[in-house]
Image (spheres, grey):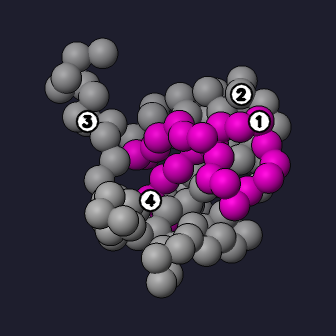
Amino acid sequence: MQKEEADKTRIDFPKAEILGNPQPAAEAVFTFSGTNQVIQAEQIFLDAGLKVRVMPIPPEIQSGCGLCLRLPVPEINSAGDLLEKSGIIPKQRYTRTLKNGKYELMLY
């Protein structure tokens, strides 16, 4: 992938500091049963112009295939609608918010 293309899909989440490392202050997290679903869903989101990243599942979550998709929180409804139309069913949807130096997860 060319640098210009990579910059178009890069997500600039609002940042907060944890031990000096910038971290997203809030994000939507989608988990799936298999990595194939993760890759299919990522492509659907990218084709629709959503900003998405494939990442390891946060340690607070103990289910799924080990990978998740992370998106800005305002895109959670659009992302859910796209998945429903495509027939891909996420295992869970969460919002992940930084509070007092730790992330809190809430099922969406």
Which region shows up in magenta? 50-73
Instruction: Residue at 49% x, 81% y: name it.
Output: 99
For label 1, the crowd category at 10 Å Cα-Cα, with few meaning under 14, some 14 to 19 and many 20 or more, is some
Residue 65 lies in the magenta stretch? yes
* Type of amino acid under label 3: Lys
* Type of amino acid under label 2: Thr
Q: Residue 91, how many percent across, how many down?
A: 80, 49
Task: Report how far apart the C-alphas of labels 1 and 4 lie in the structure.
Answer: 21 Å
* Type of amino acid under label 4: Pro
Res. 14 mark: none
Q: Please report whichever mark, 2 or 4, sits nearer to the chain's N-terminal start.
A: 2
Is label 2 or label 4 in front?
2
- Residue tagged by mark 1? 65
Task: Report how far apart the C-alphas of labels 4 and 3 lie in the structure.
Answer: 15 Å
Instruction: Residue at 60% x, 68% y: name it.
Output: 95
Is label 2 or label 3 in front?
2
Q: Is mark 1 on a helix, strand or loop?
A: loop
Q: Is mark 2 on a helix, strand or loop?
A: helix
Q: Residue 102, how many percent across, how many down?
A: 53, 74
Q: Which residue lies furthest to the front in this view?
A: 19
Res. 72 mark: 4
Q: Is mark 4 on a helix, strand or loop?
A: loop
Q: Please report whichever mark, 1 or 2, sits nearer to the chain's N-terminal start.
A: 2
For label 3, the crowd category at 10 Å Cα-Cα, with few meaning under 14, some 14 to 19 and many 20 or more, is few
Task: Report how far apart the C-alphas of labels 2 and 4 lie in the structure.
Answer: 21 Å
Tell whether label 2 touches label 1 (CB within 8 Å): yes
Q: Residue 98, how many percent across, how many down?
A: 48, 74
- Residue tagged by mark 3? 8
Is label 3 or label 1 in front?
1
Q: Please report whichever mark, 4 or 3, sits nearer to the chain's N-terminal start.
A: 3
Q: Could you say which quadrant of the image residue 61 lies in? A: bottom right
